[in-house]
Amino acid sequence: MSEDVLKYCYRSIVRYLNGDMALFLQYMDKAMELYEEEKKKGRLYITIEDLLDLATKEKLSLIMKGG
């Protein structure tokens, strides 16, 4: 899943929590549209680095440096 899809998903969640159902549905539709487009093109990816939080990245950095 690309960053664009995730951005629209996050925006839709915030709008849902704020009670703005019209904008929630609009953002969800856009996210689904982008996702389906990526799926057709076979570009469904997200890097592992994007999934890790800062603390985990720092720990892995220390391991890679040998400390």
Image (cartoon, helix red, strand yellow):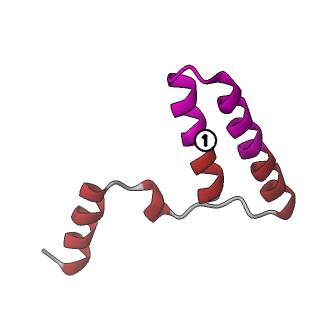
Residue 19 covered by magenta stretch:
yes
**Residue positioned most to the right:** 40
Amino acid, disc 1: Cys
Residue 57 placement (x, y as % from top left): 30, 63
Q: Secondary structure at mark 1?
A: helix
Image position of 10 (left or right of 51): right
Q: Main secondary structure of the magenta part?
A: helix
Looking at the image, which residue is at 58% across and 60% down? Answer: 46
Question: Does 38 appear above or below 23?
Answer: below
Residue 41 placement (x, y as % from top left): 84, 64
Question: Does 11 appear above or below 58?
Answer: above
Q: Quadrant of residue 28?
A: top right
Looking at the image, which residue is at 75% across and 44% down? Answer: 30
**Residue positioned most to the top:** 19
Closer to the camera in the image, 27 or 45: 27
Circle 1 crowding by C-alpha within 10 Å: few under 14, some 14–19, many from 20: some
Residue 31 placement (x, y as % from top left): 71, 45
Please tell me how many numbered marks the rendered image carries: 1
